[in-house]
Image (tube, helix red, strand yellow):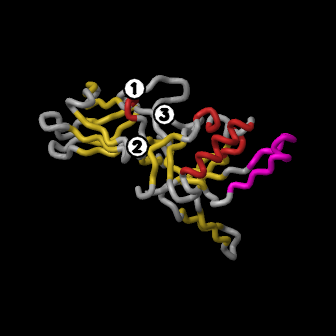
């Protein structure tokens, strides 16, 4: 992922912001009145507005400084989604068996972290590229593996690499639990700040968009 700073957007501001996943679907109405629908994106893309989290002049100054250091849309950064930042169920602690990330074949050593949404009709597996490094726990067939000795983590790409002697055996269930951030960038090169409106309670618009590899 090019032009990316491994830095987290101010957490106290992000936690009060708005946003969520976006899909792109083509819908064609037929002459009969029926519809044909086609998904143009394999993965959703999240959008946020950080302006909702800006309540004070100090917070506004933090965002301006962060924007300038990222050079507007040039550099990406980490964003903590208050609603969706864990492999576990809401309010549950991270467990090494939260998410299945692969099945061993006796030779494959690298596994991509991911989170699955849904369970019956059409589960969606979301690749996770920006885990929080000290939160990642991994298990093979339910037995937790030790980070550092059994596996290493690339927290900039979301990959787990098992060391020699610890590569999952054929048919072994490889699972993981983790906290994660969303890779985003500013979706504008112009940060408009009206101090008179802000003082009167108006919310500045600070759009962010997820970066897809």
In the rendered image, the residue lying farthest to the left is: 165
> How far apart are the two marked residues, 1 and 3, measured between alpha carbons?
10 Å
Characterize the magenta stretch by its predominant secondary structure: loop
Residue at 58%, 61% (x, y): give it: 24
Tell me which numbered mark, 2 or 3, is placed earlier along the sequence: 3
Residue at 20%, 46% (x, y): give it: 108
Secondary structure found at label 3? loop
> How far apart are the two marked residues, 2 and 3, measured between alpha carbons?
11 Å
The image's mark for residue 95 is 1
Tell me which numbered mark, 1 or 3, is placed earlier along the sequence: 3
The quadrant in which residue 55 appears is top right
Residue under pointer 3 = 86
The image's mark for residue 114 is 2
Q: Which residues are magenta?
A: 191-204
Residue at 59%, 54% (x, y): give it: 186
Question: What is the number of callouts on the image?
Answer: 3
Secondary structure found at label 1? loop
The quadrant in which residue 192 appears is bottom right
Tell me which numbered mark, 1 or 2, is placed earlier along the sequence: 1
Secondary structure found at label 2? strand
In the displayed structure, would residue 22 be above or below residue 154?
A: below
State left or right for residue 155 relative to residue 189.
Answer: left
**Contact (CB < 8 A) between labels 2 and 3?**
no
Q: Position of residue 201 (x, y in %)?
A: 84, 40
Q: Is residue 123 magenta?
A: no
């Amino acid at each position: 992922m090019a032009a990316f700073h491994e830095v987290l957007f101010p957490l106290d501001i992000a936690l009060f912001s708005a946003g969520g996943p976006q899909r792109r679907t083509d819908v064609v109405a037929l002459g009969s009145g029926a519809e044909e629908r086609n998904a143009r994106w394999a993965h959703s893309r999240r959008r946020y507005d950080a302006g909702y989290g800006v309540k004070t002049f100090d917070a506004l100054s933090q965002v301006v400084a962060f924007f300038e250091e990222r050079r507007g849309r040039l550099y990406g950064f980490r964003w903590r989604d208050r609603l969706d930042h864990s492999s576990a169920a809401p309010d549950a602690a991270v467990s090494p068996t939260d998410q299945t990330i692969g099945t061993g074949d006796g030779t494959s050593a690298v596994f991509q972290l991911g989170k699955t949404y849904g369970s019956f009709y059409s589960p969606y597996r979301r690749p996770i590229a920006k885990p929080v490094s000290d939160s990642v726990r991994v298990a093979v067939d339910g037995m937790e593996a030790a980070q550092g000795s059994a596996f290493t983590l690339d927290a900039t790409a979301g990959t787990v690499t098992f060391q020699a002697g610890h590569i999952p055996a054929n048919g072994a269930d490889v699972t993981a639990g983790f906290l994660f951030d969303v890779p985003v960038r500013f979706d504008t090169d112009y940060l408009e700040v009206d101090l008179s409106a802000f003082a009167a309670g108006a919310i500045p618009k600070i759009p962010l968009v997820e970066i897809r590899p």
